[in-house]
Amino acid sequence: MKKKVIVCGPYNAGKTTFIKNINPQEFIGTEKREFDLENLIEKETTTTVGIEMNFLKNGTYQFLFFGLPGQEKFDFIWEIIGENFDGILFLHPAYEDVRKLKFYIDFFSKTNSFSKAFKMILITHCDEAKINNFETFKQFGFPIKTIDPRKKEEVFEIINFITKIFNGDLYVKNL
């Protein structure tokens, strides 16, 4: 059974790294080097400019993961991919204001799939900012977990968690 999972969130949340670590051989990326217009030089950093994809079979499920660019100027891509999904992962850097997360949740909550889809908040960059509690994130009512998307084992913990939800082996009640 195929399951479409969207991975979204603000710029530099770790979405590309998360998607890439699912199955490096199947990763389809759209990263491009950033350009400094003021100094007319190419930067060392990259940004996602399109849809990133990866595929993984886990149990009876074939997961199709779609990573979306985080910049608002690409919201037309969010609209295209943001339909008919089974799950959505909101990656959010610990150092970012929670209002950015709310922006993405509000955007996707207007889609037809949102009410029945599995939703989860993954807090990234915890090594750069302290998270003392999850109270500010609990307002959304979704499961919350910290993650380092650079660590494959943490990415697979999330995939196994999602698989259990879809199997009915795990029930997640709103917070």
Image (cartoon, rainbow, N blue to C red):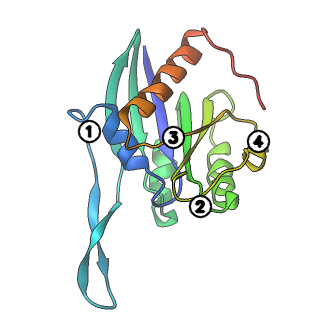
Mark nearer the viewer, 4 or 2 = 2
User: Residue sitting at 23 percent across and 83 percent down?
Assistant: 41
Determine the secondary structure under disc 2: loop
Disc 3 residue type (three-letter): Ile
Question: Which kind of residue does numbered mark 1 sit on?
Answer: Phe
Give how far across and how far down residue 57 sits, in percent: 34, 18
Instruction: Read off the residue under disc 1.
Output: 27
Element under disc 4: helix
Residues marked 4 and 2 touching at CB (< 8 Å): no
The residue where tag 3 is placed is 147
Mark 4 or mark 2: which comes first in sequence? 2
Look at label 4 and name its amino acid: Lys
Indicate which disc residue 138 carries. Answer: 4
Residue 49 position, x and y percent, is: 35, 60
Is there CB contact under 8 Å for labels 4 and 1? no
**Considering only vertical position in the picture, is 30 above or below 87?**
below
- The disc, 1 or 2, on the residue closer to the chain's N-terminal end is 1
Dot 2 alpha-carbon crowd within 10 angstroms: few under 14, some 14 to 19, many 20 or more:
some
Kindly indicate the quadrant of the structure image that contains residue 1.
top left
Compared across the picture, whether 76 is left or right of 144 comes to left
Q: Where is residue 78 in the image (x, y as percent from the top left)?
A: 49, 50
Residue occupied by mark 2: 95
User: Is tag 2's residue or tag 3's residue first in the polypeptide sequence?
Assistant: 2
The quarter of the picture where residue 40 lies is: bottom left
